[in-house]
Image (tube, rainbow, N blue to C red):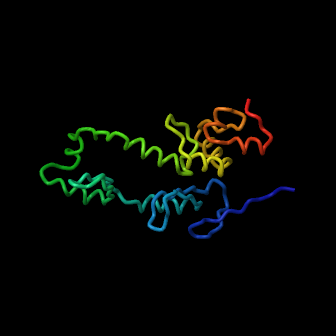
Amino acid sequence: MGQKTVRFSDLSGELITHDDAVARIVIRQHPELGDRPVEIEAHADEARAIEKAALRLAVVDLYLPGDDGPHQVAMDADSFDKLATEKAMTEVLLGARPARRIPGAAVASDRAAYASAAHAGTPHRGRITETEKQLVRERFEEINQRLARQGLRTISLSDPEHVERYGLEDLARSRGIAPA
């Protein structure tokens, strides 16, 4: 006897009859969303409609005098382009110098990214935060599936380095796996 999985669009509730018609949609920012991305499934046609309706945005960091740090602002790209009155914005951007790195800023943003389910467990050189360790422990299978889909190394409970790096001793023990 076989099993058949029936899938419905999270957007419309409509039945998705073919596996190749399922689109994965990750929502990274939304006024009703917390600080972690979420994912839903929808029919591929619904996802294509999202792509067609997409806005062209300019995302900028504003460093204003007297402020402690930057304010990130997203705005319509056409409105941003109109701010350039002497030359076309394309010309301004082509002539602009690369942004200076602010010490510690990239490290902090990288840590924040790896402390999300969308990036936890992804190989990186930095320190593993307690939040990332907790995510890997709590969502071990889900994270390994994502890593495999992305063609990245998965986290092995039999690899002592992985077990120590992510604090997986209890999980390995509960599954009867002793790191090699």
Q: Quadrant of the N terminus?
A: bottom right
Residue 144, image quadrant: top right
- Pick whichever, 54 or 141, lies toward us: 141
Give the residue displayed 54% in from the left and 61% down from the top.
Answer: 45
Q: Quadrant of residue 92?
A: top left
Report the number of discs. Answer: 0
The residue positioned farthest toward the right in the image shown:
1
> x%, y% of residue 95?
20, 40
Name the residue rendered at 78%, 45% in the picture.
174
Quadrant where the C terminus is found in the figure: top right
Name the residue furthest left: 86
In the image, is 75 to the left or to the right of 153? left
The residue lying furthest to the top in this view is 180
Q: Where 38 falls versus 155 (above or below)?
A: below
Q: Position of residue 158 (x, y in %)?
A: 72, 34
Q: Position of residue 73 (x, y in %)?
A: 32, 58
User: Residue at point 64% right, 63% down?
Assistant: 16
Q: Residue furthest bottom?
A: 13
Q: Which is nearer the eye, 82 or 126?
A: 126
Occupied quadrant, residue 54: bottom left
Q: Residue at x 64, y 36 (%)?
A: 164
Q: Residue 103: x, y in percent?
A: 34, 39
Taking 45 as reference, is 172 left or right? right
| Direction from residue 49 to residue 16 in the image, left or right | right
